Amino acid sequence: MAFLVFLGTLVFLMQVAAYAASTFTIAVIPDTQNYVNETNPQPGSLSVFKAETRYLADQKDSMNLVFVTHVGDVVQHGDGTDGTADNASWGAGTEWERARSAMDIISASGLVFGMSPGNHDYDNYSDPARGTLKGSVLWRRYFGSGSSYFAGKSWYGGASDSLPYNPGLSSFQTFQAGGRNFLHISLEMEAGDPALTWAQGVIDSHKGYATLITTHEYLSPPANEDNRGPMALPAQRIAATFLKGSHGGWNDAQGVWDKLISKNDQIFMVICGHAWTPTIAGVSKAENMRIDQNVFGHPVYQILTDYQGNTLGLDGIPDADPGGDGWLRFMEFNLEAGTIYFSTYSPTLNRYAGRNGQWTFNQHPGFSDFTLPIPYQVLNALVSLPATPTALPAPRP
């Protein structure tokens, strides 16, 4: 009997070890507004967005894809209001429906995912007299806590629905990978103090979870004339521009760093989009990074990913219509090697960026294809054991 118990325990420990040593991937969908844009040729532009989500769904198992995050600017024209009597003048309802048709592919695959709003996703974005951004009606309708994407999902923790101004724009998700618990917060852009307080409450209720934050606007890209490699100078954090004067308050990227990110040791990465340089000959600089120590002395990776200005197309000739070529960012975690491998791939072009020293976006390849050490926050995250471990052998009669 003692031998059987020992054998069963050994099998269980081997299963746990294999579970904890697995390699897994997190994917990033950059700004998609031009893929659904009413003023771009359709359905061609939408087909790129769908190619992205279909690729992610198809690669779920082979990549061990555990989470997908969208950085925001899901649509182009907010609620479509342009200051005229015709609120649908920009076809915003159609744009949201197009975005839903692409994200339906992700949802149907069973992938765990999060959505972060960008400036184009606010209800009043297309109103020329808008002042500060406001309004979350359509965001909550399509990607809020009550949407079919998230309602009732065990991995979806909730949204900032209780905030009195622009409610429901932030949300959080949890997942397990490599034997560890992860927390992802989709944080609204230029988050005000109430939204940061909400996010702090989420972190406090998930102590020890390795934590990623996606927020739309955070880092600037290198200048077009800057051809240096990554971190020759730290990427600049963006000053608040869209929500100044908001009744919900606002913080620029530095404020978000000071008030939330740097003070929580379990946060190991910030992912953002939004920022890109003007397109020249079909390419744009829109990748950047910086690494800072939090107040506990541990690194926090901050990564910009936005490819809407890269429009070379299959023939290498700049496309007439903007939007991007379906580039995605992948982060492959290898706990045994202690590395995170960042790669950039377009399923529409079947092409990697930055491979073999190629300056794909007229930018140093080290921005597109690189490896970083797995940080302390992941290695020391709260352990999650397999949900259904092997049962111990029953004793012989």
Image (cartoon, rainbow, N blue to C red):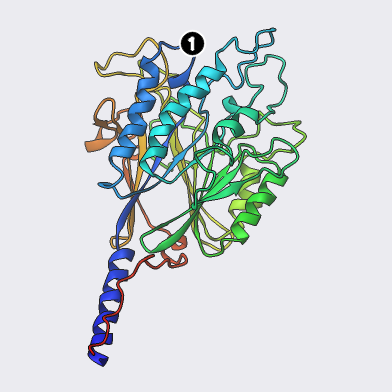
Mark 1 lies on residue = 39
Residue for point 33% across, 38% down: 56
- The kind of residue on which mark 1 rests is Thr
Element carrying mark 1:
loop
Residue 340, x across and y down, in percent = 35, 52
Q: Is 250 placed left or right of 265 in the picture?
A: right
Foreground pick, 7 / 13: 7
- Position of residue 217 relative to residue 160, above or below, is above
- Dot 1, crowdedness within 10 Å: few (<14), some or many (≥20)? few
Foreground pick, 204 / 87: 87
Residue 328, x across and y down, in percent = 36, 34
Residue for point 69% across, 51% down: 197
Q: Say if residue 265 shows up in the picture.
A: yes
Instruction: Tell which residue pokes out farthest to the bottom in this image.
Output: 2
Q: Say if residue 32 shows up in the picture.
A: no
Q: Quadrant of the C terminus?
A: bottom left
